[in-house]
Amino acid sequence: MRRRILDDHEDQDPMSMVSNLFDVAMVFAVALMVALVFKFNMTEIFTQEDYTIVKNPGKENMEIITKEGQTINKYKPSEDQTAQGKKGKRVGVAYQLENGEIIYVPE
């Protein structure tokens, strides 16, 4: 009798190779996500500390992301704050010096 290279069991299950490809794809996806987190210095997302991130500061599409405990809040300031029921007032001015230092002057 000729001996087969593959088992009879493997010969009967054509989906075994697909499941192995799925496992490889999942490992690749997780490795890619970890690499992106370290590439963009976003490791503070995984810490237990509270933090605030300002994306695109001073531009129209500025976003403020805060983490307090386990909750993450995302705030997009807009010109029409009264439509959202939020009101505020100007409390001061911030100046950036030539050396990069920022000074806040309350009014």
Image: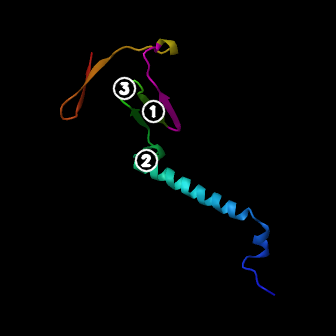
State the residue position of label 2.
43
* Residue 80, numbered circle: none
Name the spot of residue 38 as percent of width and height, x first.
42, 50
Direction from residue 93 to residue 85 in the image, left or right:
right
Looking at the picture, which amino acid does disc 1 mark? Answer: Ile
Residue at the right extreme, as displayed: 1
In primary-sequence order, the first of circles 1 and 3 is 3
* Label 1 residue SS: strand
- The range drawn in magenta is 69-81
- Specify few, some or many for label 1: CA neighbours under 10 Å numbering under 14, 14-19, or 20 or more: some
Image quarter (top left, top right, bottom left or bottom right) of the N terminus: bottom right
State the residue position of label 1.
65
- Specify few, some or many for label 3: CA neighbours under 10 Å numbering under 14, 14-19, or 20 or more: few
46 or 99: nearer the eye?
99
State the residue position of label 3.
59
Residue 93 is one of the magenta-drawn residues: no
* Label 2 residue SS: helix
Residue at the top extreme, as displayed: 82
Q: In this view, does 55 lie above or below 19?
A: above
How far apart marks 2 and 1 lie (CA) works out to: 15 Å
